[in-house]
Amino acid sequence: MAKLGAEDEQENNPVSLTEMKTIIKSLHRTPQPQDSYHLLSRPQQVVIFRLRTGHNRLNQHLHGKLHVVPSPMCSCGEAEQDTAHILRDCRNHQVLREEIWPLPESLHNKLYGPVAALQRTTNYISRSGLQV
């Protein structure tokens, strides 16, 4: 069968072998579903990533890892300034938190929930004036 195919006149194809391989692979690749994180804008992704990992500009990280602030405590004086404290408990941002989340919402949903939940979190951080 290969000999018969080789004897046939071959069509002139302007696509290179490398390009053809790429085309064939893309036809067989299943599309990856987009999670809510990847549907955010790049600046929103940065905020969520920093909050999730703890590699941010909150006092707990700046004091514990980098030693650039004298204390890990929040300016409210109640606890160390970390992601959980800022998103759930800090009294300095209580009014804004209640405005953005009028109903209780879990920390997990604020950081890993649907797009709308993640956008509320980034909006909260932006409006609070915190640098993460």
Image: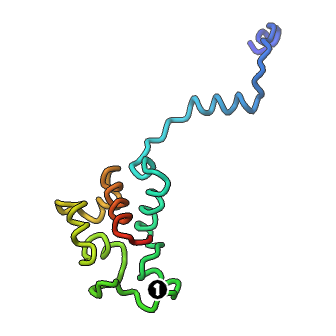
**Residue 17: x and y, percent?**
76, 29
- Count of labels in the image: 1
Q: Which residue is mark 1?
A: 64
Image quarter where the N terminus lies is top right
At a point 39% along the width and 49% down the height, the residue shown is 36
At a point 42% along the width and 77% down the height, the residue shown is 58
At a point 40% along the width and 86% down the height, the residue shown is 72
The amino acid type of the residue labelled 1 equals Gly
**Residue 45: x and y, percent?**
46, 57
Where, by quadrant of the figure, is residue 112 drawn? bottom left
Specify whether 96 is left or right of 132: left
Location of residue 29 with respect to 56 vertically, above or below: above
**Residue 129: x and y, percent?**
38, 70
Image quarter where the C terminus lies is bottom left
Label 1 crowd (10 A; few <14 / some 14-19 / many >=20)? few
SS of the residue under disc 1 = helix
Specify whether 83 is left or right of 95: right
**Residue 125: x and y, percent?**
36, 66
